[in-house]
Image: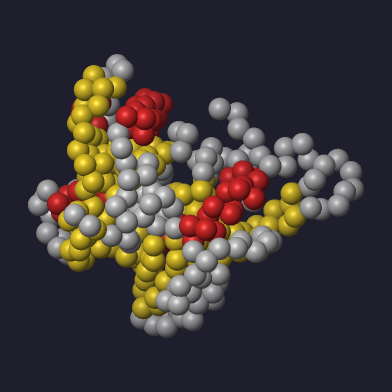
Amino acid sequence: MGCSVIKRIIVTIDSHTEGEPTRIIIGGLPNIPGKTMVEKKNYFEKNLDFIRTALMLEPRGHRDMFGAIITPPVSDEADFGVLWIDCSEVADMCGHGSLGVTAVAVETGMVKVTEPITTVIFDTPAGLVTGYAYIENNTIKSVSVQGVPSFLYKEEVINIEEVGKIPVEIAFGGNFFAIVNAKDLGVRVSKDNIPKLVEYGLAIKNKINKEVEIQHPTIPHIKYVIGTRIVDEPTHPQAHVKNVVIFGDGQVDRSPCGTGTCAHTALLYTKEEIKLNEEIIHESIIGTLFKAKAVKEVSVEKYKAIIPEFSGRVYITGIHTFIIDPNDPMKYGFKVY
């Protein structure tokens, strides 16, 4: 301890979306240059990644933390831009975070509020995203997000140690996901089974990224699977399907995962298991819900795709002022796993 020159003060608004955190950085960062969000992402990764580790990892964050960085927009339509961060990387897109950013933008006056619907548009490295806050008597009643074009990319069979050969469906919903059935792994999607779900989820993700060619047809820098979505029978009486997404270096999504929900909805639509505007309710590992549907059929090069829309609950949990002390040996965070 002792007096020192404070190197950096960072201000955040924290929220959770159906249990999954979003730490939204609103102040204290230098300019992040770039004419596109991909350029901004690349600059941040090369020059400011210590901000990500400082706010996502311990002692300020934890293994399963997630965050968003608000930037100036890069398109005429957008209100602002967003970069997504977690404990292992800067991501291209985040669904639960998009719900969180939409709600926080409205709750804190970042955008002009109109009843009954306030529209929030923001740039991301995966494309333009539109959020909707449904407002009654100056109170947000619900939040939904219309995601980027989502599609089933390919189907594979991979061999996983302890399990054997399993079918995997790779779908895009802002990020690429490996979607597998819990029955094929011999494990249920339950909090009691998290260690085994993490083990299998990471093994599947790493196997695919090592052995399967992944390349988004129109977004050159997106060329890997970000996580594994393990699908099971629902336990919530309102849900149609239950899942858990394992991403990063073992992070467990507490929500049903927004981009994973978009990818899964695209998969169901492509296989004609749902129709346009047919609602499907996705349950998370902690029992929280996203409502999702395909609102429009589009194409992404040769792929049949949809515009997905999903909704969930968002709550602000705090406003924080973080200090990065140059004399602190753990100023940029640490891991114990």
Residue at 27 percent of width and 30 percent of height: 188
The structure residue drawn at horizontal position 32% and vertical position 41%, both measured from the top left corner, is: 214
Q: Which residue lies furthest to the left in this view?
A: 272
Q: Is residue 186 visible?
A: no
Quadrant for residue 205, please give it.
top left
Q: Is residue 191 visible?
A: yes
Q: In this view, does 92 lie to the left or right of 160?
A: right
Q: Which of 313 and 98 is in front in this view?
A: 98
Q: Nearer the viewer, residue 211 or 174?
A: 211
**From the viewer's perspective, is residue 191 above or below residue 148?**
above
Residue 9: x and y, percent?
73, 57
Q: Which residue is drawn at 64% across and 51% down?
A: 48
Number of marks in picture: 0
Towards the viewer: 203 or 246: 203
- Left or right of residue 289: residue 331: right
Q: Which colour scheme is used?
A: secondary structure
Residue 18 percent coordinates (x, y): 40, 53
